[in-house]
Image (spheres, rainbow, N blue to C red):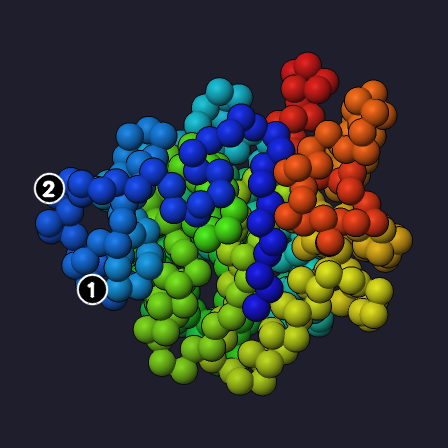
Amino acid sequence: MKSPAPQPSVDRAPVPTATDGRPETISALPPSSAGFRCTICGGSAIDHGTLRDDGVRVLFCAGCGMGVVEQRPADTAHFYTDDYYHRAEDSAHGYADYEFTAEHGLLWTRVLIERLLPTGGAVLDIGCATGFLLRRLGGAYRRAGIEANPAAARVAAAAGIDILGGDVLAPGLATAHAGAYDAIASIATYEHVLDIRAAIAASLEMLAPSGVLILEVPVISESRSNADWYGSSFEHIFYPTERGLRSLFALFPGVHFTGTETAIAGYSSTYIGLATRDPDRFAELQRLLAAMTADDPAPLTEDDARLNLAYTVLHEFRPTPARIIRLPLLLERYFSPNLGKRLMQLWYGDAVQAVDAAAAGVRIAAAEARAATAERWAAAPLTTISIDRLRRRIGR
Ligand SMILES: [Zn+2]
């Protein structure tokens, strides 16, 4: 297991949630908590609650650690209307620039699937949006998607993707496709469903015997700020912790599960999880996860280095000199204008901080915030900046 170093945000005003990982704990639990029943472990004891910025309470189960909104909505379709993937700048839910986010946020998933299934196979993307990941995988793969947003699903279908439906929990859907997929990706989806345990069960049912489930969800971190998860994305229903996810997968006999917290620079953490029933496949997943998260890509094979760079540089936004030197390996195979834009943001951020530091006569303005990661960043301290700060810098 990789244990990410504490990484204070350098781009936003201090918030009470900054570092303790257990912010704004509600000492007097609401009356409705008396009827709490955990979806994962069936427990009725609440460890603590946290107040979301919209006033909704998130309750964390004492038994398994999973977090869930105090009152789950009757249905979720109203969250995923046609503006979800093209939201207004001031909206608190949805994606401002889905294609740009998808390009750098999903590259690691694409590279991982290509490593696991080098000659093709059947791939399902749960929450496929416009089919971005599947389109990038190309026609060598038999591609299917599940998508709640009708407009996005139509775009995916027009690109040749077989849309199975709008909800992984739809009655009969998983049974109709039991054992059908060599890889199932579910990126930023399970936190949206009404029943995460049933959604994982349905996903596992659709896996082939040696199939692999690749997931990413927001995680309530023990070591980093969770402000992004409590301050936006109010359509989320589940607030996973690492313990909650491990408890969840432990409910499925014969399923092996591993994962890692992804410490995205300037943003709250996500958790990447990998699951399979096949012991040999699991050993391969553990090896690939270690390569993907390695601090130094220099000793890695070219294929492993591509996976590492897609994850550490494009997704985590954490370049180092050793990673930058190997970037051509990634870009010679995967370059696109949006990946170039992402790298330009990094470069611009470094340049801005260098100018700031020179002007202030200090090596780096955010030196104090960086002290926790000084060892890791000793060779290249001018590297972390968020998109939000960039936007303020360039005045839009
Ligand atoms: Zn529980």
Q: Where is residue 168 in the image (x, y as percent from the top left)?
A: 37, 56
For the residue labelled by badge 2, is the local secondary structure a helix, a strand or a loop?
helix
Q: Position of residue 58 (x, y in %)?
A: 29, 43
For the residue labelled by badge 1, is the local secondary structure a helix, a strand or a loop?
loop
Q: Residue at x 67, y 49 (%)?
A: 373
Q: Is mark 1 within 8 Å of ligand 1?
A: yes
Q: What residue type is labelled 1?
A: Gly
Q: Please report contact status of discs 1 and 2: CB closer than 8 Å, yes or no.
A: no
Direction from residue 89 to residue 329 in the image, left or right = right
Residue 137 visible to the viewer: no
Residue 296 visible to the viewer: yes
Direction from residue 105 to residue 374 in the image, left or right = right
Direction from residue 216 to residue 291 in the image, left or right = right
Q: Is residue 274 above or below residue 221?
A: below
The residue that label 1 is drawn on is 42
Q: Residue at x 10, y 41 (%)?
A: 31
Going from N to C along the chain, the mark reached first, 1 or 2, is 2
Q: What residue type is labelled 2?
A: Pro
Q: Is residue 378 above or below residue 175?
A: above
Q: Where is residue 29 in the image (x, y as percent from the top left)?
A: 18, 43
Residue most toward the bottom? 280
Q: Which residue is drawn at 68% across and 55% down?
A: 311
- Specify the label residue 31 is tagged with: 2
- Specify the label residue 105 is tagged with: none
Residue most toward the top? 395
Pick whichever, 79 or 301, lies toward us.
301
Pick whichever, 393 or 213, lies toward us.
393
Quadrant containing the C terminus is top right
Quadrant containing the N terminus is bottom right
> Which label lies toward us, 1 or 2?
2
Pick whichever, 7 or 396, lies toward us.
7
